[in-house]
Amino acid sequence: MRQFLTSFFVFLSVFAFAQVPPELVSFRAVAVDASQNPVTSTTIAIRLSVLDGSSSGSVIYQEIHHPTTDAVGGYNLFIGNGTPTGSEVFADITWGSGPKYLKLEQDLANGTTFATVGSPTQLVSVPYALYAKNTLTVPANSIERIKTVYEDLRLYTDLTPGKLLFVEGYYKSGDGGGGYFLYSDTQNMPDNGGIYIQPNPGDAHAGGDPHQPGRWVRLWDGPINAMYFGIMKYPDVYTTPYTTISNTSRIQAAIDFIADSRNYIADPLGDAHPPHYSDERGDLTLKFPDGQYYIDAPIQLKTEVHIEGSPGTLFTVAFDHDYDYMFEIPPGPISRLYVENLQMDLGGSRKKPTHVGGFHFKAAFKNGDTTLGGGLWGCTFKNIKIFSSNGHGIWLEGGEWAETNPAALDNQYMLFEQIWIVRTSPDANCLKITGTFNTTTFQNCTFEIPYVYNPDTQLTQCDPGVNILIEARGYNPAIPSVITFLNCATGGHVQYGFKIKNSENITIDGNWIESTEIAVDIQNSKGINVLNSRFANAGGLGSLLGAMLPYGQGRCISVLDSHVTIERNYTCVTDPMAKDAGELFIMGIGENNVINARYNSFQNIRQSETYGITQIVQAAPVDVWHLGTTQNGLDLGAKRTVVVKGNRKTIMRFNSSIAAGETIFIRAEDMDLLFESWDPVNELYGRNLYFGGPSQFILKHGKAALFMKLDGANNTERACYQLVGTY
């Protein structure tokens, strides 16, 4: 079987490769030894002979080559460029005098003892350009040609094993879905309409008995053209007699074939073996040429599938169809999925708009089994534009919690690059992240509503929606975390650019946020970083009209019960002198925030105003861990600037999570405060304040003190707070 396949690939190469000037023919083959093993990385001797008239005809030209095989035994050469064994000249061959055959011989030791490989093969296509020099009459092609895969291939009756056909197209000649098919009487792979076709002489459109062997097997080189599976472009998809054909079902057939072929290990929770797996395959990238493809139902993406469009590839929701999302995933883990170069029109701008979203990746357990988990792991999405979306552009949904494997339903370790999403409904998000989600980067992405030009002379009401929503599902293990937005953009005359709730370690770095009432809204979250970004009319719409929030409530960054770092950002507005240009840069809501803000710059001094960075703290009993008791003091967390209120006037201890070397600024707000010092020699009192001599000092109300955190002097108290000065 291996010898047959090797001979066939030699045959195919002759016809598939173009003529190479001057008057040469490109040729590729695979060298195998007597045990049918590829001969790799070896210099061998090849003798090629052109025979006249038949496979046993006389030699009219012969040459020798010495190619070096590659890592799989393949080698390339040009017929006509070898060392001739006689006086004949390749360019002088009279191609029109009758059929010509090519005989291949090899010596794997690179000597002169040649053995014939396969049978001589008729030259039928490549030499035509040479043939045209001396005649206008083309000899009959020995490879039979038929018109279509859709009608003619299943009806074809000559089922000789090894029969080779050239099919001109899928539905019509030249539509890109044709190609070479080889008949195998032992092949029993399911008929998938693209790679394996089961003959049915009675009815081209009715399935035969899938248990009976015998298939036409497509031969291809390079990516799988979507046309191979009968996927149609507009307007053919709405042309009789093809109106009942589902593009989605044919795309799914191609995806299933690729997924099965790459994942040939038995699935413990599914099929005993993949239904379409075969060693007889080429490149497994599904390529969509330029054109508009109408999608009539959701498409399921699978592990290791690579979908690649072209600059002009457009997926459109089919007319009179409305479904939830264009792309989804099945239960179980999906890894190494790669989607690139697509445009998606979701129909939100039609007279009869759809409610279709773009991608919905919901993590779920397969068949109820919690051991393998689910969701997207290690996947990449690049250069995708989604527009006219009334549904969520992308929804990354972490699944439900399971006691035996609580973090198994993560969407994680992903890259989204050059993604551009335009939503048209305030009820949808460009990007929605819920549940367990982590370690993912969004790079050079844009999330917006349709562009609004809103000068001072024209009022356009602000969109009340949210472009980017990140939130937990309500239980502790399922939280979005370690997510980076790098060099992205959002806005478009909208109320919220980002809304982040119940999340951790979200970084917004180098983003452009424009025309928002609240650029970044943060609630009940930790480790949120807003860095190096530009806020343009991003608080209360800046100097633009159409804001819905009352004057003074607009802000670039809103913080509630959260720990946030805000550094090295720039804020500007269209008209710096407008009376509405002074909305807040930062608004801290409540007394449970840690807001670290520094090194930010502003176009106008009014844009630097903040509220709530200074937090109110009540003096109260705090834990002394090494003693298992409490002392009166301040529970500061990571707060660095506080005012102290309350009825307790004596402070003996700070509990703070800042690092050694950092400082805490404290002001006595409405009463005098008595601070008592620790004894570094005897730490049994649980005090950790040190004044450098005095045992106590009084901070008058309205005055302030600065403390620096240091390492503990002994092994009982691990930290102390040195008084630096009073003010």
Image (spheres, grey):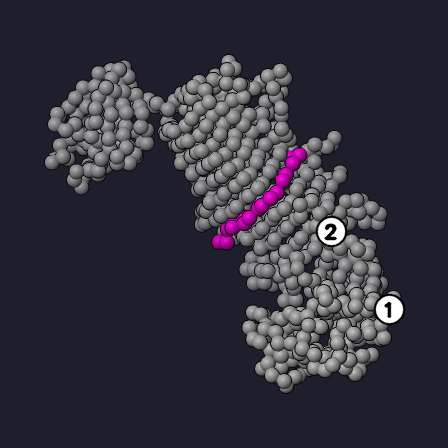
Q: Which residue is mark 1?
A: 135
Looking at the picture, does residue 315 appear above or below residue 287?
above
**Residue 651 shown left or right of residue 287 in the figure:** left
- The magenta stretch spans which residues? 371-389
SS of the residue under disc 2 = loop
Residue 684 picture quarter: top left
Looking at the picture, does residue 321 appear above or below residue 102?
above
Quarter of the image with the C terminus is: top left
In this view of the protein, can residue 164 be seen by the observer?
yes
The x, y position of residue 475, in whole percent, is 45, 38
Q: Which residue is mark 2?
A: 231
Residue 146 picture quarter: bottom right
| Dominant secondary structure, magenta | strand
**Residue 592 shown left or right of residue 716 in the figure:** right
Question: Which label's residue is closer to the chain start, 2 or 1?
Answer: 1
Residue 46 picture quarter: bottom right
In this view of the protein, can residue 556 be seen by the observer?
no
Alpha carbon separation for disc pair 2 and 1: 40 Å
Residue 554 or residue 676, whichever sits in front: 554
Density class for disc 2 (Cα within 10 Å; few <14, some 14-19, many ≥20) is: many
The residue under the point 52% across, 41% down is: 443
The residue under the point 82% across, 72% down is: 95
